[in-house]
Image (cartoon, rainbow, N blue to C red):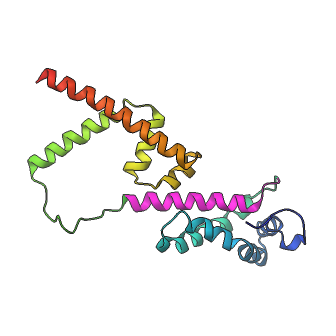
C-alpha cells in the first residue's frame, strides 16, 4: 500500500488530499481517488466475488466523498480510514446478498401444510437451542450460517483473524450439538 506519511510533496500525500477534499475541494478528492484506488481495489477483490468488486469500490468512494469532511488528522493513514469504509461495504454487500431469495430451480413445489408445520417446529427448536449459547457463539453462527458470510468477512466484522473465526465456529457448533443432544435425550425420555 502507498505510504501516507508526510514525506514527498504535501499536495500528493493522501492524508493531505483527503483533508482538502473535506473542505469541498473536488480536485483534491479526484487526486486522492487516483492515489488510492489500486490499493482499495486489491483489498476488495481479495475479499469479494469478482462480479461485485467494482460496485463495492464505487460505493466505498461514494461514502468516502460524502464523509470526507468527517476525516480528522490524528496521524492515522487516510488509506486505513478508506479500507475501513471498504470493509463495511463488503460486509453490507454480503448481508444484502444473503437476504435475497434464491429459488431452487429443481424444487418448484410448495411444501404441504404438514411439511410446513414440521419445518416450523424444527426452526423453533433450533432458535431455542441457539438462545442457550453464549452471545459470542450466537453471533458467529448467525454470521456464518444465517447471513452466510465468508470467513474473511466474519473476521473483519468481529475484528479477529480468520483462524480465530474457524476455531470459534467449531466451538460454537460443538456447543450447539451438546445443547441439541440434551434436547433429544429429554424428548426420548418424555416420549
Q: Position of residue 168 (x, y in %)?
A: 48, 40
Q: Position of 185 compared to 46: left or right?
A: left
Residue at image position (51%, 65%) is 48
| In magenta stretch: residue 102 | no
Q: Position of 63 compared to 163: left or right?
A: right
Work out which quarter of the rendered image holds the C terminus and state it. Answer: top left
Q: Quadrant of residue 37?
A: bottom right
Q: Nearer the viewer, residue 161 or 28?
A: 161
Q: Is residue 83 above or below residue 62?
A: above
Q: Position of 64 compared to 17: left or right?
A: left
| In magenta stretch: residue 93 | yes
Work out which quarter of the rendered image holds the N terminus and state it. Answer: bottom right
Q: Position of residue 7 (x, y in %)?
A: 90, 66
Q: Nearer the viewer, residue 146 or 64?
A: 146
Q: Position of residue 89 (x, y in %)?
A: 55, 61
Q: Nearer the viewer, residue 74 or 150?
A: 150
Could one spot residue 62 in this view of the protein? no
Could one spot residue 28 in this view of the protein? yes
Q: Position of residue 159 (x, y in %)?
A: 59, 46
Q: Nearer the viewer, residue 153 or 30?
A: 153
Q: Quadrant of residue 117?
A: top left
Q: Main secondary structure of the magenta part?
A: helix
Q: Quadrant of residue 177?
A: top left
Residue at image position (75%, 61%) is 78
Residue at image position (37%, 58%) is 99
Q: Is residue 47 above or below residue 36?
A: above
Q: Which residues are magenta?
A: 75-98
Residue at image position (48%, 68%) is 49
Q: Position of 106 compared to 52: left or right?
A: left
Amino acid at each position: 500500500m502507498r505510504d501516507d506519511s508526510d514525506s514527498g510533496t504535501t499536495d500528493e500525500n493522501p492524508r493531505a488530499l483527503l483533508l482538502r477534499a473535506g473542505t469541498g475541494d473536488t480536485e483534491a478528492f479526484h487526486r486522492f481517488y487516483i492515489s488510492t484506488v489500486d490499493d482499495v481495489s486489491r483489498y476488495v477483490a481479495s475479499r469479494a466475488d469478482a462480479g461485485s468488486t467494482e460496485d463495492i469500490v464505487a460505493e466505498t468512494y461514494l461514502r468516502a466523498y460524502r464523509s470526507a469532511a468527517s476525516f480528522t488528522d490524528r496521524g492515522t493513514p487516510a488509506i486505513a480510514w478508506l479500507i475501513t469504509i471498504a470493509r463495511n461495504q463488503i460486509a453490507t454487500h454480503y448481508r444484502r446478498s444473503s437476504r435475497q431469495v434464491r429459488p431452487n430451480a429443481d424444487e418448484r413445489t410448495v411444501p404441504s401444510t404438514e411439511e410446513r408445520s414440521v419445518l416450523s417446529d424444527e426452526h423453533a427448536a433450533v432458535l431455542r437451542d441457539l438462545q442457550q449459547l453464549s452471545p459470542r457463539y450466537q453471533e458467529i453462527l448467525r454470521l456464518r450460517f444465517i447471513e452466510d458470510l465468508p470467513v474473511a468477512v466474519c473476521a473483519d466484522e468481529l475484528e479477529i483473524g480468520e483462524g480465530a473465526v474457524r476455531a470459534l465456529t467449531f466451538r460454537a457448533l460443538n456447543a450447539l450439538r451438546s445443547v441439541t443432544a440434551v434436547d433429544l435425550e429429554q424428548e426420548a425420555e418424555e416420549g
